[in-house]
Image (cartoon, helix red, strand yellow):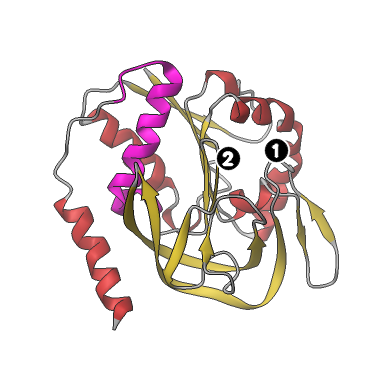
Amino acid sequence: MLKVCHLYPDLLNLYGDRGNIIAFMQRCRWRGIPVELLEVNVGEPVNFADIDFLFLGGGSDREQNLMAEDLLLRKDSLQQAIEEGLVVLAICGGFQMLGQYYLTHDGQKIPGLGILDVYTKAGDKRLIGNIVIEVEINGEPVKVAGFENHSGQTYIGNLQPLGKVIAGFGNNGQDQLEGVRYKNVFCSYLHGPLLPKNSKLTDLLIQLALRRRGLDTSLPRLNDDLEEAAVGVIVERLSK
C-alpha cells in the first residue's frame, strides 16, 4: 500500500494542481498497486514518516500566507522524512516555500522552510506561457511539458535542476534551468497540471515511492499514446 498525502488541498490547488494527485493514484490503480489518499489541512496532524508521496501545490499570495505559518511548524519532521527518502512533488508556491526565502519588491525577506538551498525574489514581469523542458529519467532525456505563470524568480545555486529549458522561461528566465531535484524531492513551476500529460515523470515518482516502501519497482507498461501526443503538440507549437 502506498500512502499519498495532499498537503493543504483547500488552499494550494492553483491551475488544476490536484490533477497531479489524480494522475499518480490512477496510474497506480491501473497496475493494481493499492494506494491511499490522506488530505491534510491547516492544523491537522500528519506523520511524514508514514507517507510515501507528498504533494504540495501552488496558490495565491493570500493562500500561501495562510499556510506558511502552519508549514513552518512541520519543518523538522518534514525535513527528516525528506532526508530519509520521502518522495515530494512541490509546484510553484510549494517550490518557493521549501527554499530559504522570498524577497519582495519592497525588500521584505519572507522566510521559507530552508530545506532547499534556493531563494526567490520578486521579478519585474510575469513569466507566463507554455513551457517544454528536458528531464533525465532513468538515463533517458525526456521532453516534459507544462504551463508556467509566476512572477517570482528562483535561483538554485549548485543544486541539480529538474530539467533544462527548451522553450519557455523556467526558474528565472535567465539561466535556462527549471525546477530543482534534491534526493526524492522534485520541484517545478510547471502547472497544467504536470503529471497527467507527463507519464514517464509520473512513473518515476511511483517507482521511487515503491522503493521507499520496500516494494517491487517494476511497472507494467500502460498505453500512453494520448499523453505523449499532448506533449508532442506543445513541443511542435513552441518550436515554430
Region of the chain picked out in magenta, as a range: 193-217
Residue at the front extreme of this rendering: 139
User: The residue under label 2 is which amino acid type?
Assistant: Tyr
**Could you tell me which residue is drawn at 58 percent across and 24 percent down?**
84
- Among the two numbered marks 2 and 1 on one chain, the one whose residue lies closer to the N terminus: 2
- Which quarter of the rendered picture does the N terminus lie within? top left
Q: Is residue 164 above or below residue 212?
A: below
Badge 1 element: helix
167 to the left or right of 122: left
Q: How many marks?
A: 2
Q: Is residue 196 magenta?
A: yes
Instruction: Say which residue label 1 marks.
Output: 71
Residue 38 locus on image (x, y percent): 48, 27
**Could you tell me which residue is drawn at 69 percent across and 53 percent down?**
118
70 to the left or right of 30: right
Compare residues 111 and 175 and report the one nearer the observer.
175
Instruction: Say which residue label 2 marks.
Output: 8
Please report contact status of discs 2 and 1: CB closer than 8 Å, yes or no: yes
Compare residues 45 and 206 and report the one nearer the observer.
206
Q: Quadrant of residue 154?
A: bottom right
Residue 15 locus on image (x, y percent): 45, 59
